[in-house]
Image (spheres, rainbow, N blue to C red):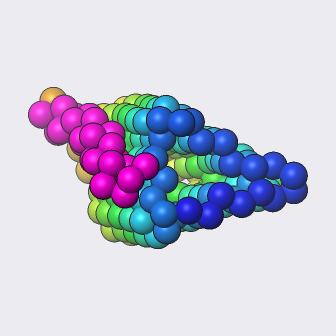
Amino acid sequence: MPVLPFGGVRPRVDPSAWVAPTATLVGDVTLGAEASVWYGCTLRGDVMPIRLGPRSNIQDGSVVHVTRRLAETVIGADVLVGHMCMIHGCTLMDHAFVGLGAIVMDGCVVEPDGMLAAGALLAPGKRVGARELWAGRPARFVRLLEEDEVARNRAGAAGYVELARLHRESLGG
């Protein structure tokens, strides 16, 4: 797995976190306990920091970047970021969910238990409220999430912690 310094800053990965061998971390990137970064992902903290909280995951093929001189990317605890997402200069609070192929642009916030649907595009500066579901291109508020949907999303983050452990063992790490 490429872990590359930039500007004298090297990514910091908690020993319990897992990074797939084909993922790339560059510069000021910090991964919390039991976080996971999956196959083919790039987290490039070259001009601002990227913070990935405990038990959060960035799934296969996703890109996480920042906005130069404007916005770091902060991803809280127990966050799910689906396959092939673009996360750029934004904040994903604890228990947020970003669906497959979604784009979260500069200055956006997804509040706790907020959900951005698969394929959605959250335009710059938008805010998904707690327990809100947003969908579309551009994304718009659809409805509040039901209790079972929130529970399923939260269980998904725990499931990825276990799956990362299995991948680590399978690869001899």
Going 62% across and 64% down the picture, which residue do you hit?
2
Please, what is the dominant secondary structure of the magenta stretch? Answer: helix
| Residue found 56% across the figure and 36% down from its top | 14
Q: Is residue 169 above or below residue 138?
A: above
Residue 159 within the magenta-colored segment of the rendering: yes
Q: Position of residue 90 (x, y in %)?
A: 59, 49
Q: Quadrant of the N terminus?
A: bottom right
Q: Using the image, determine if residue 105 lies above or below residue 169.
A: below
Residue 170: percent from left, percent from top? 30, 55
Q: Which residues are magenta?
A: 148-173
Drawn side of residue 130 relative to residue 8, left or right? left
Left or right: 139 as drawn, with respect to 44: left
6 within the magenta span: no
Q: Position of residue 106 (x, y in %)?
A: 62, 56
Q: Residue furthest left?
A: 148
- Above or below, 71 against 137 in this view is above
- Residue 13 as seen in the image, left or right of residue 158: right
Viewer-proximal residue, 132 or 93? 93
Q: Residue furthest right?
A: 7
Does any portion of residue 151 appear in the rendered image? yes
Q: 173 or 57, which lies in front?
A: 173
Residue 73 image position (x, y, % from top left) = 62, 47
Residue 62 appears anywhere in the view: no
Q: Is residue 130 above or below residue 133?
A: above
Residue at (27% x, 40% y) in the render: 162
